[in-house]
């Protein structure tokens, strides 16, 4: 009996299929484990108070309620906290993206003294835990008169976002051929015009990818907000609103979960808006 040339291919597919199914099942289990806390948070936000305090935890509710969300939005300072968080996160994203773009272009296109040392310092800055720098930053903000202001949250987050952003954008800037820059100069384009009209659009996916990480870290920050905003609660950000629902006698877990759900919505909206750019940006970073 003659053997078909497709038999080895069919046999290979049959052999690899169980491994593929196992990998897909593992991926689904990991995704379910990651998504379950988010599901439980949203579920608890819609549960009535009786079900939240019940000793029998059930992964569903037959009587969803908006009372927890009503208590959240009835807080007088909640809207101010939301706007403060939006302003701080937006400022950090824009400022860190522009500074990182210029710095990545400088360390990639130009040769200057201590360039390698500067790049190593960027790596070292990422290795230092934020908790170890909180007290020195507190005294620094105090000496500059920035305590109880939004600047005490903006400047540290910009500083902590820059090392990662610069390292990531170096790959995108390096991927742009130098011949393109030379052709632009021959056509009469100045360095500034090449920088903003040619190079900036080409590395924009990388800027989006770095902006997502800086936005999430700034939006969810609690350590700096608790350490640098001491007495002026009008300058607090959204994570500080959760403290309102922590009470000495009994915590309002419904309000905590509802406030946490409201905090998650802007992050999801931002992620959906930049999803396509983020995928292409991460793909470019991996390729580099």
Image (cartoon, helix red, strand yellow):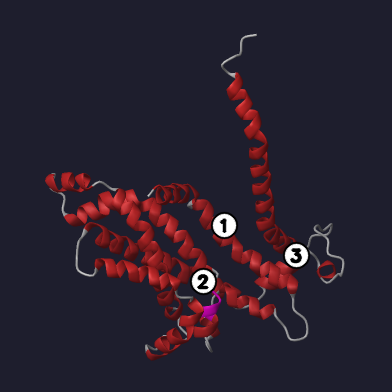
Nearer to me, 14 or 86? 14
Q: Position of residue 285 (x, y in %)?
A: 41, 51
Q: Position of residue 223 (x, y in %)?
A: 54, 78
- Direction from residue 165 to residue 191 in the image, left or right: left
Tell me the mark number nearer the camera, choosing from 3 and 2.
3
Q: Position of residue 222 (x, y in %)?
A: 56, 76
**Is residue 96 depicted above or below 177 in this figure?**
below
**From mark 3 to mark 2, how far is it between C-alphas?**
24 Å
Residue contact between numbered discs 1 and 2, judged by CB atoms under 8 Å: no
Element class at badge 3: helix
**From mark 1 to mark 2, how far is it between C-alphas?**
15 Å
Say which residue label 3 marks: 44
**From mark 3 to mark 1, how far is it between C-alphas?**
19 Å
Say which residue label 1 marks: 268
Question: Which numbered tag is attached to residue 85?
Answer: 2
**Residue farthest to the front, as pictured:** 1
């Amino acid at each position: 009996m003659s053997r078909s040339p497709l038999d080895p291919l069919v046999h290979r597919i049959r052999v690899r299929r169980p491994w593929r199914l196992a990998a897909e099942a593992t991926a689904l289990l990991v995704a379910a484990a990651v998504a379950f806390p988010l599901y439980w948070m949203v579920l608890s936000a819609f549960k009535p108070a009786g079900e939240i305090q019940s000793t029998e935890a059930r992964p569903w509710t037959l009587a969803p309620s908006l009372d927890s969300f009503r208590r959240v939005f009835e807080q007088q300072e909640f809207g101010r906290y939301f706007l403060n968080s939006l302003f701080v996160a937006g400022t950090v994203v824009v400022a860190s993206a522009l500074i990182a773009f210029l710095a990545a272009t400088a360390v990639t296109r130009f040769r200057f003294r201590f360039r390698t040392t500067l790049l190593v310092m960027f790596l070292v800055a990422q290795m230092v835990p934020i908790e170890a720098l909180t007290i020195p930053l507190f005294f620094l903000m105090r000496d500059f008169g920035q305590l109880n202001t939004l600047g005490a949250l903006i400047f540290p987050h910009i500083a902590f976002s820059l090392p990662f952003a610069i390292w990531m954008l170096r790959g995108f800037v390096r991927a742009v051929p130098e011949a393109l820059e030379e052709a632009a100069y021959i056509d009469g384009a100045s360095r500034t015009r090449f920088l903003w009209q040619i190079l900036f659009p080409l590395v924009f996916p990388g800027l989006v990818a770095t902006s997502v990480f800086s936005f999430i870290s700034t939006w969810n920050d609690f350590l700096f907000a608790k350490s640098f905003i001491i007495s002026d609660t009008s300058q607090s950000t959204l994570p500080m609103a959760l403290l309102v629902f922590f009470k000495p006698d009994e915590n309002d877990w419904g309000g905590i979960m509802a406030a946490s759900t409201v905090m998650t919505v802007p992050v999801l909206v931002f992620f959906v808006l930049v999803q396509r750019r983020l995928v292409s940006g991460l793909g470019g970073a991996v390729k580099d």
